[in-house]
Image (tube, rainbow, N blue to C red):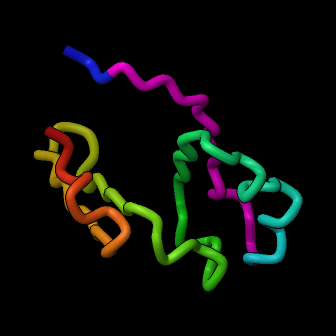
Amino acid sequence: DPPGVRLAVWPADLYRLDTPDETRALALEEGGHALTIIEWPERLGDALDRRALCVRIEGAGEAERRLTARVPPAWEGRWPPR
């Protein structure tokens, strides 16, 4: 059963950005309690919140996919989901 939690989802694709300064116009920090999903998060540079759960999916086309996660201390006990 899915959990009884509902979150707004804010998707952000940073592919076309050249510098971390360009991300300010996106106001990602204003998401509050929303789930923000960021493609190309490395484009944020040092602005990426160190408390963020980072999940990477590698592989394309017919290749096998590989899922890895960087789980910061703020997520201990919450990841992996049960």
71 lies left or right of 50: left
**Residue 8 at x, y = what percent?**
60, 29
Instruction: State which quadrant residue 26 falls in.
Output: bottom right
Q: Which residue is drawn at 36% across and 19% down?
A: 4
**Residue 59 at x, y = what percent?**
24, 52
46 lies left or right of 37: right
Q: Residue at x 55, y 52 (%)?
A: 38
Report the residue that reaches farthest toward the right: 25
What range of the chain is rendered magenta?
Answer: 4-19
The answer to whether 24 is drawn above or below residue 36 in the figure is below
**Residue 73 at x, y = what percent?**
31, 75
Instruction: State which quadrant residue 11 falls in.
Output: top right
Magenta span dominant secondary structure: loop
The answer to whether 61 is drawn above or below residue 77 in the figure is above
Of 38 and 28, nearer the camera is 28
67 lies left or right of 43: left
64 lies left or right of 56: left
